[in-house]
Image: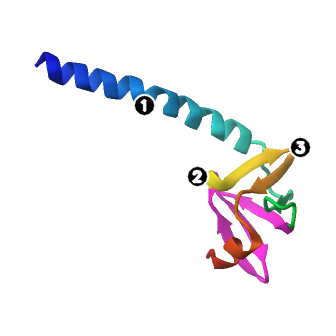
Amino acid sequence: MRITLSIAGAILLASTPVLAQDAAAPAAVAQIRAGKVLRDANAVRLGTIDRVNADGSVKIIFESRFVTVPADTLTVVEGGAVTSLSKKDVRKLR
């Protein structure tokens, strides 16, 4: 029984920094708003953000179609929205 509790405690302690990082990430992404321009990591303009979804992902019109860019790829750099995806990667999204 003690071993089980020790293992559970170790797992909980090991996961705490990850939880803290996840909590900080939405704060930065919360600055992303509809109407802002979304750029890729190379500062190439991908499109204007049409909608910010509840999960933090954004919809843009990219090459005449709606594309949803996942929230975990988004950051705010100098007040602008940036994705870690390249333009080529965004072409593959739906």
What amino acid type should be assigned to the residue bearing mark 1? Ser
User: For residue 78, which numbered disc appears in the image?
Assistant: 3
Mark 1 vs mark 2: in front = 1
Q: Quadrant of the N terminus?
A: top left
Residue extending furthest bottom?
Answer: 64
Identify the mark nearer the N-term, 1 or 2. 1
What amino acid type should be assigned to the residue bearing mark 3? Glu
- Give the Cα distance between marks 3 and 1: 30 Å
Q: Residues within 10 Å of mark 2 (few under 14, many from 20)?
A: few
SS label for mark 2: loop
Q: Quadrant of residue 50?
A: bottom right
Say which residue appears at 51% left-offset and 28% top-offset. Answer: 17
- Give the Cα distance between marks 3 and 2: 23 Å
**Is there a contact, CB below 8 Å, between mark 3 and mark 2?**
no
Q: Is 4 left, or right, of 91 in this rendering? A: left
Tell me which segment is drawn in magenta. 45-70
What amino acid type should be assigned to the residue bearing mark 2? Asp
Measured from the top left, where is residue 75 in percent x and y? 74, 48
Say which residue appears at 14% left-offset and 16% top-offset. Answer: 2
Q: Residues within 10 Å of mark 3 (few under 14, many from 20)?
A: few
User: For residue 15, which numbered disc appears in the image?
Assistant: 1
**Is there a contact, CB below 8 Å, between mark 1 and mark 2?**
no
Q: Is 71 left, or right, of 31 in this rendering? A: left
Measured from the top left, where is residue 23 in percent x and y? 58, 33
